[in-house]
Image (spheres, rainbow, N blue to C red):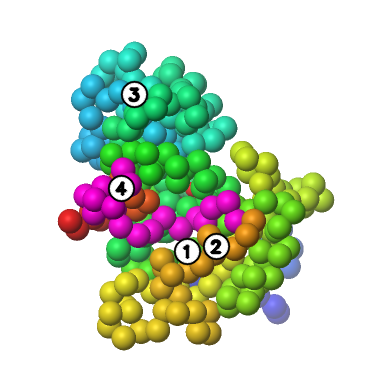
């Protein structure tokens, strides 16, 4: 008699063994329910960790009497807005700068006042900007754009005195492109295929124009009406790897993070690259920028409910 045995990768032991084909349907349903429950519980734990990281980041960085606040995009930023509301401070004079459509809706629904980036008065520097990230490395370089927002996120982060990232522990890695698979790049539609070819020449394996969820609807469009090209590369080296003698010049597709970001940015048709890199904080200010692309600090919610922080070293 045949028996059905299902192995759980977590427990590495049989969790079901049914000797009869008659019982197969019930068995399959039981197992499906089991995995659905596990999936839901994992998702709940990830959401809880995003909320914990957001609460801690807002508690530590949201300035009393903030006048200008950048609000990023994605699923984690929702908890940042929730945490700002929970502070209970008077936000009637605070202006919140969105990084796209979803971000603006989030601000408005929370009863806060949005002001588009191009309506910020000249000379205004944002007190702070919060955003999510797809991956963050030891040096606080980030990949962003998994949700197709990156250009507005970058200009808002660059306009802020302090840029703070909030994420769950899946995003906490030593090097970029460890767990996250590709670099999102925003490109002019007419140049998209040429950009894909150039990325292949640079060692990207199968770069692809991102499609809508319903693929027959064609390429996904950003808030700027541009396309996103997703470019996989091997894990990116940091400057410390290069100082230690590793070759990050692009041989066999292996790149140092800023070298690659600058090289992609230089391809005609590229509006922006989903790598936030380079100098940050006082060093950036000395170089004439407000804050730099990298966050001052990144907060990660861990599965045990705690929060860990990576901070820029000045
Ligand atoms: O395009 C999306 C943005 O860069 C997001 O901030 C990033 O993808 C992180 O999103 P989430 O908080 O949903 O993981």
Residue 295 visible, this angle: no
Residue 238 visible, this angle: yes
Location of residue 47 in the rendering, given as x and y in whole percent from the top left corner? 42, 44
**Is residue 273 shown in magenta?**
yes
Counting residues from the start of the chain, the first of labels 2 and 4 encountered is 2
Quadrant of the image containing the C terminus? bottom left
Question: In this picture, is 33 found above or below 120?
Answer: below
Q: Tell me, for residue 266, which label it has, or none.
A: 2
Q: Are marks 1 and 3 in contact (CB under 8 Å)?
A: no
Counting residues from the start of the chain, the first of labels 4 and 1 encountered is 1
Residue at 28%, 39% (x, y): give it. Answer: 161
The residue to which callout 3 is attached is 85
In which image quadrant can residue 137 be found?
Answer: bottom left
The residue to which callout 4 is attached is 288
In which image quadrant can residue 208 be found?
Answer: bottom right
Question: In this picture, is 95 found above or below 165?
Answer: above
Residue at 47%, 63% (x, y): give it. Answer: 261
For disc 1, the neighbor class at 10 Å (few under 14, some 14 to 19, many from 20) is some
Q: Are marks 1 and 2 in contact (CB under 8 Å)?
A: yes
Which element type, helix, strand or loop, lies under badge 4?
Answer: loop
How far is the residue under mark 4 from the one under mark 3?
Answer: 33 Å
How far is the residue under mark 4 from the one under mark 1?
Answer: 18 Å
Chain part drawn in magenta: 270-290
Quadrant of the image containing the N terminus? bottom right
Which element type, helix, strand or loop, lies under badge 2?
Answer: loop
How far is the residue under mark 1 from the one under mark 3?
Answer: 38 Å
Counting residues from the start of the chain, the first of labels 4 and 3 encountered is 3
């Amino acid at each position: 008699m045949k028996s059905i045995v299902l192995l759980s990768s977590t427990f590495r032991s049989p969790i079901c063994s049914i000797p009869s084909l008659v019982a197969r349907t019930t068995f399959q349903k039981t197992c499906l329910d089991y995995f659905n429950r596990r999936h839901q519980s994992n998702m709940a734990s990830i959401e809880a960790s995003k909320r914990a990281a957001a609460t801690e980041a807002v508690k530590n960085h949201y300035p009393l009497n903030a006048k200008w606040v950048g609000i990023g995009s994605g699923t984690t930023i929702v908890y940042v807005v929730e945490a700002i509301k929970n502070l209970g401070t008077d936000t009637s004079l605070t202006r919140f700068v969105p990084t796209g459509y979803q971000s603006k809706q989030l601000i408005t629904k929370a009863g806060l006042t949005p002001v588009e980036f191009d309506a910020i008065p000249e000379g205004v520097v944002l007190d702070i900007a919060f955003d999510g990230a797809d991956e963050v490395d030891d040096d606080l370089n980030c990949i962003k754009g998994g949700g197709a927002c990156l250009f507005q996120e970058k200009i808002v982060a660059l306009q802020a005195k302090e840029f703070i990232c909030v994420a769950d522990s899946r995003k906490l890695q030593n090097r970029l492109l460890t767990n996250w698979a590709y670099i999102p790049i925003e490109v002019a539609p007419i140049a998209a295929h040429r950009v894909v070819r150039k990325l292949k020449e640079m060692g990207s394996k199968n770069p692809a124009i991102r499609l809508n969820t319903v693929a027959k609807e064609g390429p996904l469009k950003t808030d700027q009406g541009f396309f996103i090209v997703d470019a996989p590369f091997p894990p990116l080296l940091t400057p410390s790897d290069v100082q230690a003698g590793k070759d990050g010049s692009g041989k066999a597709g292996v790149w140092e993070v800023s070298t690659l970001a600058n090289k992609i940015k230089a391809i005609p048709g590229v509006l922006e690259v989903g790598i936030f890199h380079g100098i940050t904080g006082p060093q950036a200010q000395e170089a004439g920028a407000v804050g730099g692309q990298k966050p001052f600090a990144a907060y990660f919610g861990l599965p045990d409910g705690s929060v860990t922080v990576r901070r820029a070293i000045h």
